[in-house]
Image (cartoon, rainbow, N blue to C red):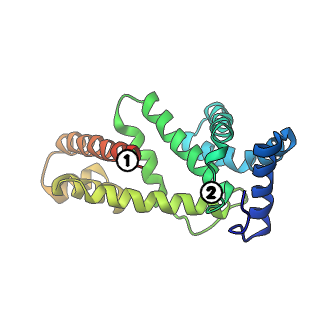
Amino acid sequence: MDLKNSTSEKAKRDAQLVKDALENGSQKAYSDLMSYYRDPLYYTLLKMMKNPYDAEDLTIEAFGKAFKNLEKYTTDYAFSTWLFKIAINNCIDYMRRKNTSPQCVDEDFGVFENTSESDSVQSQEENYMMKERARVMHWAVEQLRPKYRTLIELRYFQELSYEEISKELNISMNNVKIQLFRAKYMLSAIMDKMKNAI
């Protein structure tokens, strides 16, 4: 594996571990990669799932998927960025399977919360992934029909209550909920198409 694109010491370290795992079947390399990223990955997924058992399962699953597809990793990106992308996409898939309604899209809107400050478990890679999801979500919202886009913007970008939206649009609160449900359903479908196209 070519390490010339890996600029930071951490990136070089990770790229060397990936190389050892692939070329030499080094179990220590796999173990080291997991030890470096298990905790930050777990806490990221815990924030999304709000359930320690699901977060633990999804953490193990993410490492399993990453290690199974390790030959697809390139040093164009940090290993941690690649790993977190796999984990977050897997988490979103899980939420969509678990919920028959598209309410899981609400989790995606969490990326619009403050991402400028890092806490003790949030790495630069996590910030990058959250900001990237925010960019994707903004694009997806733009694809909605105007009335549904307005509902999403009022609810999630301006953080208005159902009652406030009802007054703003001069429609019943029940109608707000129904139309917002449809808007989230359409948004979920757009996100799925985007993911399948990648």
Quadrant of the image occupied by residue 152: bottom left
- Which element is circle 1 on? helix
Can you say whether 171 is above or below 102 in the image? below
65 vs 165, nearest the viewer: 65
Residue 29 visible in the displayed image = yes
Identify the residue shown where x is 73% and y is 59%.
120
- Residue drawn at the location 53% of the way across and 40% of the way down: 91
Which label lies toward us, 2 or 1? Answer: 1
Q: Find disc 1 in the rendering and name its residue.
A: 197
Asked where in the image residue 57 lies, by quadrant, the reply is top right
Contact between labelled residues 1 and 2, with CB atoms less than 8 Å apart: no
Circle 1: is it few (<14), some (14-19), or many (20+) Cα within 10 Å? few
Q: Say which residue label 2 marks.
A: 81
- Amino acid bearing label 1: Ala
Amino acid of disc 2: Thr
Decide which of 87, 185 is in the foreground and name it: 87
Q: Is residue 174 left or right of residue 47?
A: left
Instruction: Specify whether 14 is left or right of 54.
Output: right
Q: Find residue 62 and report its horizontal and vertical position in percent.
A: 63, 39
Pointer 2: residues within 10 angstroms few (<14), some, or many (20+)?
some
Q: Distance between the residues labelled 2 and 1?
A: 20 Å
The residue lying furthest to the left in this view is 170
Q: In which quarter of the image is the N terminus?
A: bottom right
Q: Where is residue 118 in the image (x, y as percent from the top left)?
A: 65, 64
